[in-house]
Image (cartoon, grey):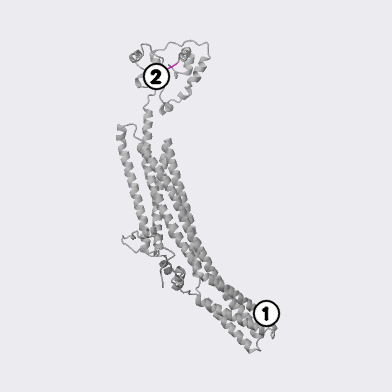
Amino acid sequence: MSSVREDYMAPWWTYWLHNFPHVNLNFQPIDSTFTPQDQNYQQSLIFLGCMAAAGLGLNLLCLAIYLSCLCCCRKDEEEESKSPNSCCVTWSAIAAGLLSCAAVGVGFYGNSETNDGVYQLTYSLYNTNHTLGGVDSLVTGTMGSMESGLKQNLARLDEIFATRGDYVQTLRFMQQMADNVIKQLLGLPDWDMAIVDLAAIADQITYVEYYRWLTYLLLLILDLVICLAACLGLAKQSRWLLTTMMVFGVLTLILSWASLGADLATAVSTSDFCVTPDKFIMNQTKDLISSDIVHYYLYCSQTLPNPFQQSLTIFQRSLTTMQIQIQGLLQFAVPLFPTAERDLLSIQHLLNSSEASLHQLTALLDCRGLNKDYLDALIGVCYDGVEGLLYLCLFSILAICAFCAMLCAIPRAWTHIASRERDYDDIDEGDPFNPQPRRMTTHNPNHATNMHSFCSYSSSVGSQSSLHPPAVQTAQDVSNAPVSEYMNQSALFGGNPRYENVPLIGRGSPPPSYSPSMRATYLSMTEDQIRHFGNDFQA
């Protein structure tokens, strides 16, 4: 019996996965032959999932150590510099974004490839199921017509031809041919059990694949949303958004490791099947169908004999003999027994229908149709399916790297945001030309209501024509600086103090300059107007 296959060769990546070490939970190496019912083989697949779980634990441990070191070193960094270098945060965010985009792209492609392979598998299973169902229907219909319709017509003709012994002998011979046809049909394999199994397998695979495809689609969308939200949080410097994305990042990291373990175990088991698919199928069908028939359909070589050839030949010869006998009775017996014509024509029509069924049955039992479905299923699973699983494994690895980079960048960004807020808090509250710190808004709620635009103030004041000079103010009202400092700073400008807040000079801030018209407008204010507008725009 030849076992050389020329129309199918497993791809190289299935051999690569097939050579993965198969170890049970007792750390004992086992055979890599695809035997899903074997407990040791099941443990070898579970072991691959446990390896992914161990990788997850090690990853989380490294992240915990990194965060602990970051918290411990935070005080030292604060003492060295109030503004930590954000270059590391920037590059980590860029790396996380690029890796996340690459992971999502690879994941979409792998998910589509896997779905295409599984669809081709289920399509071939349904097509095979349809072929076997057609064979079973033809066999059942032909046997029913031979057992019921032919026997009834022959019984009536036996009564009509009772006076003619030669015609009765012909009828007996036709009954023997009909029994011979039924015997040959009974010799064909019973496909009912195979039809039920294929239909159940195809339905189950379709159900599982739909939810697998949907789950990965949601996971890809979740990864993309988390990446975009994290980038938005870094751009907006939002602490609550970064905290939320950090929690979701840890969750997605766990899901990525879980998907990596599941994909790897599925890819290895499928590759074990793809390397020797014929052996597994013959072992599964040895109790249902003859091994010669299974081998005939699996290899479909011209050198292999057709196991149905003898039965179909006897079927054909029996029908031909019966048709010849019916033709002779129509020619010679009908003139003598006109009442027999109806039954003879009915038998002739039945034999013609049986011959048509024989041709259809011969075409359906030919190995080329079922072998094509078998090869399509293998190509779909072992090429597109396993390739898609490898891309999904690559997606999981890239997603793990992306979220590790993101989880490392977010605490650094948190430190950077806190440092910037601390720098804002160090600004002098009495300096009206520096950005207002946040705490001023918190402690002085009436400050915003008393603040006016300088342009609107000058225009409103300039429109009044009967303003009196304000009361003379002391140097303490103008500035909180000591008089000696004020005089020393004013001497720098030739002894003529300019119209500005002099303490700003010592801080390195550029001194503001007012035009003479603005100064005249301010000096023309009354005491009531100064009390109304406050001291927000004192010179």
- Between 54 and 317, the one lying in front of the other is 317
Q: The C terminus is located in which quarter?
A: top left
Report whether residue 289 is seen: no
433 over 312 or under it: above or below = above
Q: Is residue 343 left or right of residue 364?
A: right
Which secondary structure, mark 1?
Answer: helix
Residue kind at label 2, given as amino acid type = Pro
Please determine whether, in this image, residue 262 is positioned above or below residue 227. Answer: below
Residue at x-position 42% and y-position 65%? 277
Badge 1 density bin: few <14, some 14–19, many ≥20, Cα 10 Å: some
The range drawn in magenta is 510-514
Q: Residue at x 38, y 21 (%)?
A: 510
**Residue 263: x, y in percent?**
41, 55
- Counting other residues with Cα less than 10 Å from the Cα at mark 2, is it few (<14), some (14-19), or many (20 or more)? some
Query: On the picture, is 37 further left or further right than 453?
Result: left
Residue shown at the point (51%, 15%) measured from the top left: 462
* Residue 134 visible from this viewpoint: yes
Q: Which residue is mark 2?
A: 511
* Amino acid type shown at disc 1: Arg
Give the position of the N terminus as an image quadrant: bottom left
Q: Earlier in the sequence, mark 1 or mark 2?
A: 1
Name the residue rendered at 42%, 36% in the picture: 235
| Nearer the camera: disc 1 or disc 2 | 1
* x and y percentages locating residue 264 in the rendered image: 39, 56
Residue 101, position as x, y percentages in the image: 43, 45
Q: Nearer the viewer, residue 215 or 366?
A: 366
129 falls in the magenta region: no
Which of the 4 quarters of the picture holds residue 439?
top left
Q: Which residue is mark 1?
A: 342
- Nearer to me, 79 or 97: 97
